[in-house]
Amino acid sequence: MNKQNKEKGFTLVEVLASIVILSIIVIGIFQMFIFSGNTATSNQTKLVTTHLAKATIERIKIDHESFFPIDIVEPNNEKHTFNKNNCSNYSNCDLFLVKVNDLDYEIEVTVSQNTEHEKELDLINVIVQVTQPDKNLHSKVEGYVVDE
């Protein structure tokens, strides 16, 4: 007598193989979501540092005496740096430490007059660097401020 097995279905090996394949695909998709989220957060922090640097240099153009004393800048190629560590000597320390989205950003302002020509035109070379220490991100903006 020839009996034929008429039951249809998947074997245990086929089920296990399909579970392994689906698991690999799902893990890959989750890794992609995690990477995308981390990248978006990092990009947002970098964007904040860039905007803070631009906004700070614009504030310095309007009121540079809040950030540094003008009498310290002389045309001698010497750069003077102002940050949260030495702000109490010259200005308000709140200007050099900003909190945005529950993250602290440190602002550093470097000023110099490199030539007599800059002194004649009353130009001060200003470099603003904003750093987010937790994520080790920073942005730098450079420009001239007119000493009026």
Image (spheres, rainbow, N blue to C red):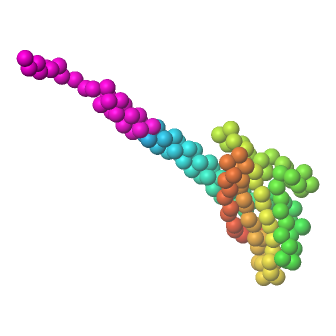
Q: Does the magenta portion include 11?
A: yes
| Residue 148 visible within the image | no
Left or right of 71? Residue 67 is left
Name the image quarter holding residue 64. bottom right
Q: Does the magenta portion include 6?
A: yes
Q: Name the residue nearer the viewer: 124 or 35.
A: 35
Vertical order, 91 against 99 (above or below): below
Q: Start and end of the magenta stretch?
A: 1-27
| Residue 90 at x, y percent in the picture | 89, 56
Left or right of 35? Residue 82 is right
Q: Residue at x 68, y 38 (%)?
A: 102
Left or right of 38? Residue 136 is right
Q: Residue furthest right?
A: 89
Q: Residue at x 77, y 57 (%)?
A: 108
Vertical order, 94 against 143 (above or below): above
Quadrant in which the N terminus is drawn: top left
| Residue 86 at x, y percent in the picture | 88, 55
| Residue 137 visible within the image | yes
Q: Residue at x 86, y 70 (%)?
A: 73
| Residue 91 at x, y percent in the picture | 86, 53
Q: Residue furthest left?
A: 1
Name the image quarter holding residue 80. bottom right
Vertical order, 41 against 110 (above or below): above
Q: Residue at x 44, y 41 (%)?
A: 28
Left or right of 100? Residue 148 is right
Quadrant in which the C terminus is drawn: bottom right
| Residue 2 at x, y percent in the picture | 8, 20
Q: Name the residue nearer the viewer: 139 or 58.
A: 139
